[in-house]
Image: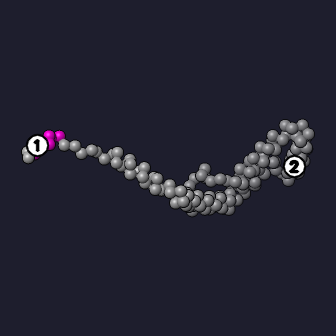
Amino acid sequence: MSTSTEEDHVNAAQSVYGTAKNVWTWGKSIPVIGFMEGVTEAVASKVVGLAGSSLEEVDNSLISPNLAGLDSAILNPVVETIVGYLMGGVSNVHGAVEFITGGDDKEKEASAKEDELKEPEITSTTAPAVVKA
């Protein structure tokens, strides 16, 4: 594969998880739903607390590293492969459309006109010779 930085990847699992956490936080502000979420979060905190941990520790030490591994091992390569195929297909479609519409010929004509304009006009600085008959 390519040698790119982490910022070049989609990281789908981490993005989905982060969005789910944001939606959960937003849902806590809605009166009826927020109450249910609050109760659910309190029960989950209590269960995790009985195991000697907290929700933040579980999130940072268990969930986040596993999501990063899922992204780097499976999801990012799959997404990169799909995007590569799609981009290849787009370039093939572009060529087919140009062939059908004659877009390539129009581009060549425009290029030829530009080249004609760029060529300097050749003019003589001396007066033409007079021919006597």
**Residue 68 position by quadrant:** bottom right
Residue 112 in percent (x, y) is at 38, 51
Residue 95 in percent (x, y) is at 53, 59
- Magenta part mainly helix, strand or loop? loop
Taking the spot 88% from the left edge, 51% from the top edge, the residue there is 47
Describe residue 91's horizontal placement relative to residue 26 as left or right. Answer: left
**Residue 72 position by quadrant:** bottom right
State the residue in front, 11 or 78. 78
Taking the spot 41% from the left edge, 51% from the top edge, the residue there is 111
Give the CA separation, mark 2 to mark 1.
Answer: 107 Å
Q: Which residues are magenta?
A: 125-131
Q: Secondary structure at mark 1?
A: loop
Q: Which three-letter amino acid code belongs to the residue tagged 2?
A: Ala
Describe residue 6's horizontal placement relative to residue 20 as left or right. Answer: left
The stretch drawn in magenta includes residue 3: no
Instruction: Work out whether residue 42 can be spotted.
Output: no
State the residue in front, 110 or 35. 110
Q: Which residue is mark 1?
A: 130
The stretch drawn in magenta includes residue 130: yes
Q: Which three-letter amino acid code belongs to the residue tagged 1?
A: Val
State the residue in front, 129 or 103. 129
Residue 39 in percent (x, y) is at 91, 44
Count residues near mark 1 (Cα–Cα under 10 Å), then give few for <14, some for 14-19, many for 20+. Answer: few
Say which label, 2 or 1, has the lower sequence index.
2
Taking the spot 81% from the left edge, 40% from the top edge, the residue there is 26
Q: Which residue is mark 2?
A: 44
